[in-house]
Amino acid sequence: MRQFDLGRLEYRAAWVRQLEVWQDVQGGAEDTLLFVEHDPVLTLGASFHPENLLLPQSEYEARGIAVVETDRGGDVTYHGPGQVVAYPVFDLRRHGSDLHKWMRGLEDAVILALGKLGLTAFPFPPHTGVWTGPRDEPAKIAAIGVKVKRWVSIHGIAVNCVNDLSPFGLIVPCGIHARPVTRLADHVAADPAALRKALAEALETTFPS
């Protein structure tokens, strides 16, 4: 598995880079993991519902938060500095050609990575993503949304690490009402570099080459 850290990058520019890597992987290159930290942005997925934006779009932009329509699955979510975003551009034909297995495997990898850092996390069906806290009143710590084209995946995972959570209060995150979001720093000592390392190792464990 190749790995590239794109540093801090505007969302659209990172999307262009994903598509370049997608072409490489589609052409036979090895599975590739991209890490990135985004400038403040709301991304609108294929299942986006306008009522989940609690302000006019112009108001987000006035606050320095871009709004971008994407082709990933899911509704609206927020990305910003201090959040660890991982885009596994993997050829799923090497991993069973099973979209359900891919999504559950991404959740498993995040859970494994957070466990290595001292935080117990778990899935919370029917919602996609990773959660922590009391199992009857969990908080979401990681969002997952992907697009698979010709069996090669783009988009991926966003784990709240040391980022400011207040922008989530300006939306209905992932369209899920009455469920809070949380971040790694609210539970254990949090370091984005350590989280990236743990995520990379967990993805290699969950989806071996």
Image (cartoon, rainbow, N blue to C red):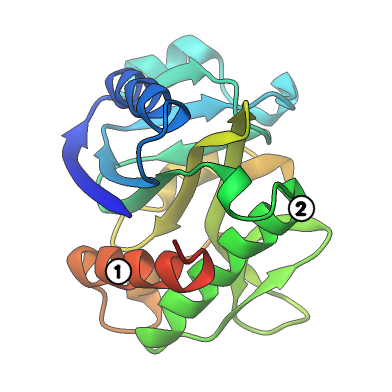
The number of discs equals: 2
Question: Where does residue 74 sit, x and y in percent of width and height?
Answer: 68, 36
Depth check: 205 or 75 in front?
205
- Residue 149 located left or right of residue 35: right
Q: Are marks 2 and 1 in contact (CB under 8 Å)?
A: no
Q: Is residue 121 above or below residue 178?
A: below
Question: Where does residue 43 sit, x and y in percent of width and height?
Answer: 51, 27
Specify which label sits upstream in the sequence, 2 or 1: 2
Instruction: Name the residue tied to disc 1.
Output: 195
Callout 1 amino acid: Leu
Q: Residue furthest bottom?
A: 118
Judging from the image, what secondary structure is the residue with disc 1 in? helix
Residue at 31% x, 55% y: name it.
Answer: 163
Q: Is residue 150 above or below residue 123?
A: above
Judging from the image, what secondary structure is the residue with disc 2 in? helix
- Residue 2 located left or right of residue 60: left
Depth check: 21 or 131 in front?
21
Residue at 59% x, 38% y: name it.
Answer: 146
Callout 2 amino acid: His
Numbered disc in front, either 2 or 1 = 2
Q: Quadrant of residue 179?
A: bottom right
Depth check: 196 or 37 in front?
196
Q: Is residue 116 above or below residue 53?
A: below
Question: Where does residue 161 sit, x and y in percent of width and height?
Answer: 34, 63
Q: In the rendered image, which quarter contains the C terminus?
A: bottom left
Instruction: Name the residue tied to disc 2.
Output: 100
Question: Where does residue 127 sit, x and y in percent of width and height?
Answer: 76, 56
Report, in whole angstroms, how far the alpha carbon at label 2 lies from the one at label 1.
25 Å
- Residue 125 located left or right of residue 102: right
Residue at 32% x, 73% y: name it.
Answer: 198
Q: In the rendered image, which quarter contains the N terminus?
A: bottom left
Q: Is residue 183 visible?
A: no
